[in-house]
Amino acid sequence: MGKSKEPEKPSTAWQGTYGDMITLMLCFFVMLYNPTEVDVTQLATITQSLQMNETESTTGGMSLSAGRLSDLGNTINALPAIEKGKSLGLAKKKAVSLFAPDVKSNRITVTSDERGLVITLASDSFFEEGSAELNIDETRETLLRLSDFFKSPELKNRRYRIEGHTDDVPVDPDGKFLSNWELSAARAMNVLHYMADFGVSESRFSIAGYADTRPKFSNNTAEGRAYNRRVDIIILDEGHF
């Protein structure tokens, strides 16, 4: 009796087609993705979604459980509107270019966080110690650039918030302000009033004074306290209106 013929091994030709399809899908999503459309938190979420644990199996095709990328579509659908994302990206590029002299002199820093695009004014460059009066002679050109920036078409229909911050050193008891709360709020308000004098719409702004409750650095050093004395002008992300 002859030996029975062994079954042929399954063809693996489909793996090439499958690999091509996955590559094309990845390229499609990369083309859709524009880094100017997301804030820092959303970018971190997408990055984490795309990372795969090295110990996980990459053979695929056999598991019925949800994959690591199962929520990627929902993440992409939750991104801000394309036009608003592009306008904020252009605004950041313009700010970096426009305020280059001020960044170089440490008067201004341009960053972004979960709130939106943040333009930080170093209080020691704009105000005298313990005062909310703007040092116009020293900072006039910078303040004019700020006013022009917030009237630019890249920021059409955007909302803003000006936040005043101080260090933890108490105010002069014989001075104008009862505490750092009043001082921080007054500094934010005076920045807004100055820009309004040059045509910036006050109706698109809100102000807040945080005193020393939101330090960026430790107040234990003179350098840290200097960084904490600041006014943040924020181009708000939609979720922080």
Image (cartoon, grey):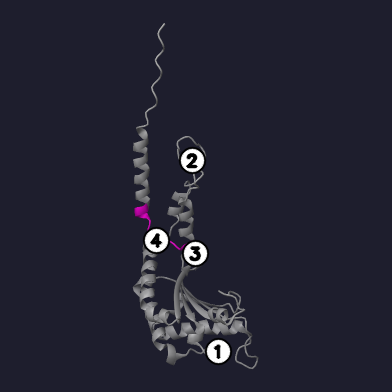
The vertical placement of 233 against 29, above or below, is below
Q: Please identify the dominant SS of the magenta region.
A: helix
Q: State the residue at coordinates (64%, 93%).
A: 174
Q: CA distance from mark 1 to mark 2?
A: 61 Å
The residue labelled by disc 4 is 35
Q: Which mark is residue 239?
A: 3
Percent of width and height locating residue 10: 39, 26
Identity, as a three-letter code, of the amino acid under mark 1? Glu
Q: Residues within 10 Å of mark 1 (few under 14, many from 20)?
A: few
Residue 34 lies in magenta, yes or no?
Answer: yes
Q: Earlier in the sequence, mark 4 or mark 1?
A: 4
- The front one of 202 and 174 is 174
The vertical placement of 49 against 200, above or below, is above
Identity, as a three-letter code, of the amino acid under mark 3? Gly
The residue labelled by disc 1 is 129
Percent of width and height locating residue 119: 45, 75
- The front one of 56 and 237 is 56
Badge 4 element: helix
Q: Earlier in the sequence, mark 1 or mark 2?
A: 2
Q: Earlier in the sequence, mark 4 or mark 2?
A: 4
Q: CA distance from mark 4 to mark 1?
A: 40 Å
- C-beta proximity under 8 Å, tags 3 and 4: no
